[in-house]
Image (tube, grey):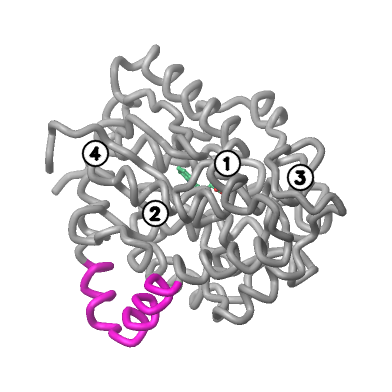
Amino acid sequence: MDKEKKILYSGMQATGTLTLGNYLGALKNWVKINDEYECFYGVMDLHSLTVRQNPSEFRKNARALYALYVAAGLDPEKNCIYYQSHVPAHAQLGWVLDCFTYMGELNRMTQFKDKASKHADNINAGLYTYPVLMAADILLYQADVVPVGVDQRQHLEICRDIAERFNNIYGEVFTIPEAYYGKTGAKVMSLADPARKMSKSDENQNATILLLDDRDTIVRKFKRAVTDSDACVRFDEEEKPGISNLMGIYGSVTGKTMEEIEREFDGRGYGDFKLAVGEAVADELEPLQKRYQELMADKSYIEKCIKANDEKAAYAANKTLRKVYKKVGLTEMIR
Ligand code: TRP
């Protein structure tokens, strides 16, 4: 392991397929910065259990997510890409940290309140202690930085609080992680309602671009995107949220600035603009999709990567877990 580099930790839940929002908001940035850090990326399948999953679909999604990480450009021979559930230390440290987290703190988590209201028939304890498991994920690897979206900011804060509390009692056991918000931080909004985030659970299929949508579907969805009646491609998130969202997407895939885009489409209609955005997105996703198909067809390669990285992750995680067990005074195992 390269000790010169700082450690980066992140992951996504293994539910459903990824959207363009997940890609531009997270995955693409991970790829951009992954050379600068020693990186761990988890397929967060234990977190997904906090809502009911269909077992066979869940298993497929988790495999697809792994392949998408790789297809998007994360190199499984340089980065550690692994399944959270394959490394028991996550659950083990999660338990210990449960005992260092106050209910009062968890009661303040806005995502818990939000999810509890959406899944009123299944407000389980896992949903409640979700942030503690997430803290365990991060702290096990002694991560310095954690790229997360704004919706995870509060979870990262509680992770830091738990780590500091633990360190205050037992000495410097955990590295205190910093949040990393990408420079572009592209927040991709729904194509049907630009006031809402693009989400895979949106009921309106035209609202969301899925990473595995084919070219025709992508172009068609962009054609239908909600805009305004002003017929001018100008960046103004307040007055023109639909157009601004499309501009953000276009800028994020082409690297063009908002001014450049305004100039490019000066005097041209929304039809032209939407088509250009659709095609640019399809062009961007095409190599990723091709690589994804290849990976899914070659099980032996992916399986080799999973095995090697599970071991690598477990090695790093167990080192921290052993230290924690010892610090809190659990009796050592006799070997
Ligand atoms: N809660 C994160 C999400 O839904 C996923 C996640 C779990 C995570 N553990 C993590 C992200 C650790 C970063 C670090 O997006």
Residue at the limit of the structure toward the right, as seen here: 229
**Which is more foreground, mark 2 or mark 3?**
3
The residue positioned 61% from the left and 73% from the top of the image is: 218
| Label 1 SS | helix
Which secondary structure type mostly characterizes the magenta part of the structure?
helix
Residue 273 screen position, x and y as percent: 65, 61
Residue type at tag 1: Met
Left or right: 167 as drawn, with respect to 280: left
Residue at the limit of the structure toward the top, as seen here: 168
Magenta includes 23?
A: no
Residue type at tag 4: Glu
Residue 287 screen position, x and y as percent: 37, 73
Q: Which residue is mark 2?
A: 42
Going from N to C along the chain, the mark reached first, 2 or 4, is: 4
Going from N to C along the chain, the mark reached first, 3 or 4, is: 4
Q: CA distance from mark 4 to mark 1?
A: 28 Å
Q: Which residue is mark 1?
A: 258
Q: Which residue is mark 4?
A: 36
